[in-house]
Amino acid sequence: MQAAIVSTYGKPPSYTTIPTLPPPTPSQLQLRILATGLHNIVRSRANGTHYSSPALPAIPGIDGIGLAPDGTRYYFNAFRTGGAFASHINVERGAAVPLPDNLDTLQAAALVNPATSSWMAMKARTTNLPPDFTVLILGATSASGRLAIPLARALGAGHVIGAARSASTLASLGLDSSVVVAEGDASTTDFSSLQGREIDVVLDYVNGALPAAFLSTHKQSKALQYVHIGTLSGREMVLPGAALRAGDVTIRGSGPGAWSLAGAAGEVPGLLQALATVGEQKVRVVKLADVEGEWERRVEGGEGRVVFAP
């Protein structure tokens, strides 16, 4: 069978022939891989910079779409084992979920991983969100932030607000309202347009000065749930204590560790159904045989997520 192999941390995988997989055990499915995404975490694991980086040599890739012998398409998760950058994979049956008929193979391979961030933040790291809740997405023009918009609506959001630096991009995302982040110093961002609006949950992909500015300046009477997801703008946030004393604010993080992999697996069927209702997203399809060149290629903005198709 064919596979991409990482032999040295920080070096691109090599496409090569490896021995055929053994027959699956009774608890496993053997799938012919149809598509698998080149996610940021896949690069981090292959570079040796992620806490879950495998011992080398290893086949990268943490999830994908595979075809079972009976013709059923499955989304599979291989976070614990890797091995998705190959022509075939053996996966535990509990880590494979049938793909809805109305969800495209390439779209699913590209989107499940980035969509999990907002889906799990809202499903596992918030409590008692009201009907038609209001959500503020910090970093709404990022790849995962864009997906958070329709997924929040799928989970019942009645008003979705996005914050990012590009006013024109924000205007194209179908948001109910938006905040343009100040150029240079995000701490000077003007959130005054949100005063008087009661916000139920903040999904933060950026960290740093922007969420600190919002939490320090926004006043409301109802409880606010802030969920930290990513660090696009910084690894640290300095938050004055007064920001926590002046209102009913709950701060949580979302990611593996904040929720369990088993818990995330239980949410996959609902996430797949929600993704089937999301409009088509940009995807760049690349043959797995070209993995080395694609790995080192500089990605241009707006190209869409990379999906390998063996």
Image (cartoon, grey):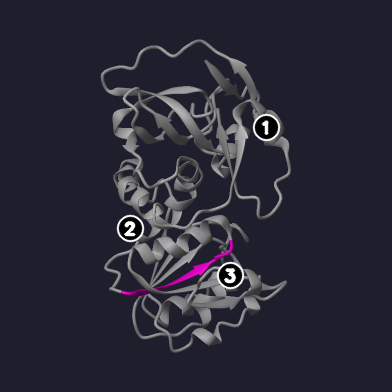
Residue 85's place in the image compared with 155, above or below, is above
* Residue 118 falls left or right of residue 59: left
Main SS of the magenta part reads: strand
Q: Amino acid at mark 2?
A: Lys
Identify the amino acid type marked 1: Gly
The circle on residue 172 is: 3
Q: Amino acid at mark 3?
A: Ser
Distance, label 2 to label 3, CA atoms, is 26 Å
* Residue at 54%, 41% in the rendered image: 41
Task: Pick out the residue farthest to the bottom.
Answer: 196
> The residue tagged with tag 1: helix, strand or loop?
loop
- Relative image position of residue 249 (x, y in whole percent): 39, 74
Residue under circle 1?
10
Q: Quadrant of residue 12?
A: top right
Residue beneath label 2, please?
A: 123
Q: Which residues are magenta?
A: 132-141
Residue 210 shows in this picture: yes
